[in-house]
Image: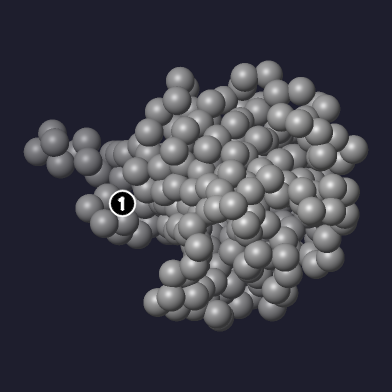
Amino acid sequence: MRRATLILLFASQANALTGREVIEQAQARNGFSTWHDRRSLVTLEPFDGAVRGVTREAAVYERTDPRGEHRTLMEYLSPDSFKGTRYLHVSPRRTRQEWWMWTPATRRARKLGGTYPGLQRDEIFFISDLSYSDLVVLVRIQQWTDAEGTATLEGEEACGEQTCDRVVLVPAKDNGEFPCARYRLWFSRDDRLLRKAELYDPESRLMKTITCGGYFASGRYMTARTCVIEHVKTQSRSTITVKEVAYDSGLGDELFAIGHLGEER
């Protein structure tokens, strides 16, 4: 009887949570968006339907400011046809993102066209409409305050053998950082790990799904070993696997400067 009462009490407390509180719990336990800088070694495996593309390996450097910019520098390490190519992704708060590219062939930085990977095909990131920048989106929206968007606890749902709380995030009207109408995030209740995300386009149509798993600890931060990003309309997808990661190692501002894209690492 006592066990049943405790279970009911826990369920009642879970249901009493707000969407914002669920996200705050996830940050407190796992630090998804509370780090300052991050460096990682990743592999990128693109698929067009059942056809597998060329697997790429890249070094990724990131620096984030919850109330300011998020900058991502990606440098391809392999294969040889991509080696040395660098992309700089700049995501300011409330305003549109920018992408810059530097290649060994041209030896100059140029600004890329486009707005957001998935809304149009471009050469942004690994030459497809699926990109590492989708994972940047997940970091940024978990940093939002009430001024930048609403967070509503939509309900609960089974996540394999676990129960997930589903949170809906809707950006404020003046928040133009990402051109998505809303986001849905699934956090497992027992550990508050982010298991799944859905991104909806400006017309509120499901655009992408992101499924993450294999979490491992790096100090006080949890990192998904693998995330699978699927584009609903094109049926293309990408698997991003983290081979190595380090947080808050003191990456300097100069690393993310446009003028330094061509410098030796």
In the image, residue 225 lies at what x, y percent?
41, 42
Secondary structure at badge 1 equals strand
- Residue at the (51%, 43%) spot, across then down: 42
- Is the image coloured rainbow, by chain, by secondary structure, or in one colour? one colour
Question: Could you tell whether 99 is left or right of 73 in the image?
Answer: right
Question: Could you tell whether 258 is left or right of 151 in the image?
Answer: right
In the image, residue 223 lies at what x, y percent?
46, 37
Question: Could you tell whether 102 is left or right of 167 in the image?
Answer: right
Determine whether 63 is above or below 114 in the image: above
- Residue at the (71%, 41%) spot, across then down: 73
- Residue at the (88%, 48%) spot, across then down: 108
Front position in the image: 23 or 36: 36
Front position in the image: 107 or 122: 107
- Residue at the (76%, 31%) spot, across then down: 264
| Residue reaching furthest to the left | 1
Q: How many neighbours does mark 1 have within 10 angstroms: few (below 14), some (14-19), or many (20 or more)?
A: some
* Residue on which disc 1 sits: 163
Image quadrant in which you'd find residue 191: top left
In the image, residue 58 lies at what x, y percent?
58, 44
Image quadrant in which you'd find residue 201: bottom right
Residue 247 visible? The answer is yes
In the image, residue 200 lies at what x, y percent?
61, 69
Front position in the image: 238 or 17: 238
Which quarter of the image is occupied by the C terminus?
A: top right
Determine whether 122 is above or below 2 in the image: below
Residue 16 visible? The answer is no
Which kind of residue does numbered mark 1 sit on?
Answer: Thr
| Residue reaching furthest to the bottom | 233
Which quarter of the image is occupied by the N terminus?
A: top left
Determine whether 1 is above or below 91 in the image: above
